[in-house]
Amino acid sequence: MLRSSVFNHFTRKMTRCLVLGDPVVHDLLINLSQADAVSLKNDLENTLKEFSIGEERKYQPDASVSTRPTGVKALFRPFTSTTGVGVKITVDPTTAPSYWSSDKRPVLHGIVALCDEEGNPRGIINQDELTGFRTPLNVMVSYFYRRHTANVVIFGAGKQALWHLRLALRLRGDDIKHVTVVNRNNDGLPEIIDQIKSENDSRWKSPAQFKGINLEESESGVNLKKVVTGADVIFCTTPVKEALFPAEWLLPRLKEGRGLYISAIGSWQSDMLEIDPSLLNKVVSSPGYNPNGGSNGVILVDDREIAQKNTGELTNSQVKADQIVEIGEVLGWKETWPADKQQQLSKWLGEGFVVYKSVGVGLTDLTAASSIVDLAEKYGKGVTIDNFSAKL
């Protein structure tokens, strides 16, 4: 009898796992409602706060890389939270000799695997669309608060650029009037403009007008200066090693105290940069707003330590740690500071000269993937594997 009662007490409950292929993930994300998009943004905000002002940073394992004799690299990025654990696996075949030909475009594939807090598998997600979505969603967290976003300039014509535009149009489409896509050549430029026009017409219906600048064209320099100096928002999404535009183009604006939002996600090594480091130097040495105190400006990042070590913008500047604030800190201060300080902080975030350098916080992969699984369950998408594991 005792044995029977113990067995009944620990009755096993079968759990299920959701498998999401790339087409399903794309369909979920491209068709986000305004409410769902804001919800995903809010989820990411909470994660960034937990990372910066909570204790989650110290519980994140280090990423690792394994290189096979063939040259193929496998990248493993684990993450943990109070509600689940996961790992992102990315295979990079472009380092192998078989990919050293000019006619092959580098393509990285992989998965994100999720478990709940007890280790029960919850989801397996193709990471192709997820990766292209998660980083721009990170940028949207700070961009969303901008008061002026009529004139948007974006550097790059790849998937990251496309998702920046999709999310900006989904979240702030009514306020966007002009979008200029800047690319180093014509490869992919007409295609991204045609695609975003079509998607906007069928989904977000923003009044925005779209155009492109091919930097190989003779008049591109004049046109580029015009759109950069007239921009309200500049998104940088390119893995380059030289600044995309001269700092001096924006110095008059900085001196006059006119606001601008610039984000950069393309550099992740110390020899890579998209923004002229001298612009960062000017921001922190010019009159502005610093939440930490002082009368000069600051640089906004998602991870201070990694940004200082691994991005050319900061390693080649004279910006110090106390001149850098994390977006997670800012979001926390917006909720906890006295009303007058919150007002100053919100004014800077919404109208100030904000430079946001994102290097990626691994924990946001877990958040984005979990949120997508929630969406799939909400809308009945994906392949469900019942009885995937037994739960006591």
Image: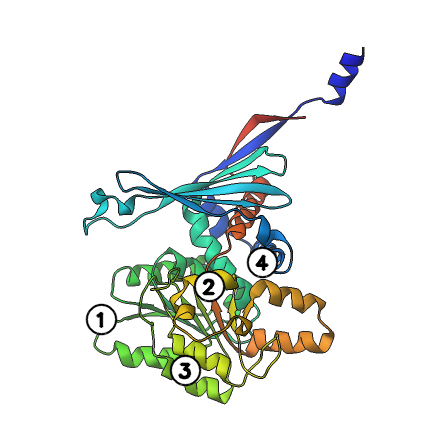
In the image: residue 390, left or right of residue 266: right
How far apart in space, not on screen, are marks 2 and 3 (Cα)? 22 Å
Q: Earlier in the sequence, mark 4 or mark 3?
A: 4
Mark 2 residue crowding within 10 angstroms, few (<14) / some (14–19) / many (20+): many
- Which mark is nearer the camera, 3 or 1? 3
In the figure, 49 relative to 263: above or below?
above
List the residue tagged with mark 2.
307
Task: Please state the horizontal and vertical placement of residue 93, each as a whole percent of the image.
Answer: 30, 43
What number of labels is visible? 4
Q: Are marks 4 and 2 in contact (CB under 8 Å)?
A: no
In the image: residue 239, left or right of residue 139: left
Q: Earlier in the sequence, mark 4 or mark 2?
A: 4
Q: Residue 372: in sight, yes or no?
A: yes
List the residue tagged with mark 1.
216
Q: Earlier in the sequence, mark 2 or mark 1?
A: 1
How far apart in space, not on screen, are marks 4 and 1 (Cα)? 39 Å
Amino acid residing under circle 2: Ala
Figure colour scheme: rainbow
Local secondary structure at mark 1: loop
Q: Which quarter of the rendering shows the N terminus?
A: top right
Task: Please state the horizontal and vertical placement of residue 78, each as a whole percent of the image.
Answer: 50, 44
List the residue tagged with mark 4.
48
List the residue tagged with mark 3.
250
